[in-house]
Image (cartoon, helix red, strand yellow):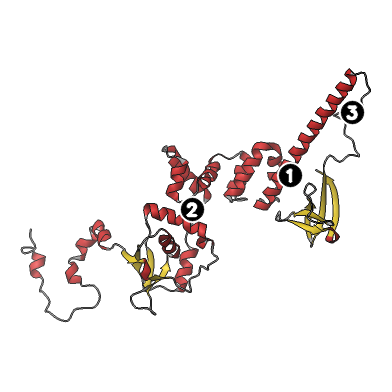
Amino acid sequence: MTAATHPATTAKKKPEAGPPASGLDLESIGDLSDLLNQPETVARNFRPLELPLDLIDEDPHQPRTKDNPGFLPESLEELARTIRLRGVKTPISVRDNPDAAGRYLINHGARRVRASRLAHKTTIPAFVDNDYNEADQVIENLQRNELTPREIADFIGRELAKGKKKGDIAKELGKSPAFVSQHVTLLDLPDPIAEAFNSGRCRDVTVINELVTAHKKARNEVGLWLTDDTQEITRGSVKLLREYLDDKRQHEDDERNSDTIESTESARAAGEGEPATHSRRDPKEADPDRLRRAIVHVQHDGRPARLILNRRPPVEGHAWLKYDDDGHELAADLAQVQLVALLEG
């Protein structure tokens, strides 16, 4: 049935001509019920604008400051790589700039704008929303739900299962191959590390990877270290743990080499009919007066630390030390260092 013969259509009286109404020209749109029954048509008709980047200004009062991690050069370059490859998929929001006619202020999307400029784009998809204020900017940033490391790892795992290479996944995400490899590690963690990660004791992917590396070399020691629920798992504490394990392994290697040398000297002396130059204690018998490896605990500037004994100090009267709380190293004046304890490593 055509519109000319439809009863509902013939019953309507065309309104008399008059001044145009403000806002949408509803008559030119037609029957809204037909439009709403066609969501694809709505999506096509209400696409974002492609605004020139040189007409967009950043809001000087936006909640993110220049020191925000999202504005770091490496972070913006990662985003720029994805924009070069795929473009901006989520339109930004802008409002009319009250101080410059024809220009726009960013409501949200400053990172996308900066990265688009780095990617040498000239336009960006955007919606104009003049009903926007500073509180909305803060809310938008507070309520944004970032992906968790586990969710990122699961996505990478699914992509790998499809046969994609890590390098291709990294390129698509705008991340480094190391980023992908670190998250792949989360898919198959040793039990004690998996427990620490899943319980929320540690969510830092870099720290988890450091623990996995240490666990491969010293399974029992790392497992025992993780059983202490009071132990904070931070980059500093894991760094100290790995250094301790490295020092312990180096000391064990030195002892083995020493045993080999002394055994060789004893055998040579016996073959030449000469007495051995020194006697050997039963290797199973420990010398109670001997420190296999000394660890010197000190206090400097009110902070606990330990001396680094295998590094030459820059000047006489100084020594290198490492703080226990954050792992920072410095050469300190020994006159300001207080000896706390001498322990065996």
Residue type beneath disc 3: Arg
Badge 1: few (under 14), some or many (20 or more) residues near its Cα, within 10 Å?
A: few
Determine the residue positioned at 7% across, 60% down.
2
Residue 342 in the image, given as x and y percentages of width and height:
85, 48
Q: Nearer the viewer, residue 32 or 313?
A: 313
Tag 1 or tag 3, which sits nearer the N-term? 1
The residue where tag 2 is placed is 147
CA–CA distance between discs 3 and 1?
A: 28 Å
Horizontal placement of 264 versus 140: left or right? right
Quarter where residue 254 is shown? top right
Q: Which residue position is annotated with label 1?
A: 244
Task: Name the residue at 48% across, 68% down.
Answer: 138
Q: Nearer the viewer, mark 2 or mark 1?
A: 1
Residue at the location (17% across, 71% down)?
27
Residue 297, position as x, y percentages in the image: 82, 52
Q: Which residue is mark 3?
A: 280
* Amino acid on which the number 2 mark rests in the picture: Leu
Vertical placement of residue 183 versus 94, above or below: above
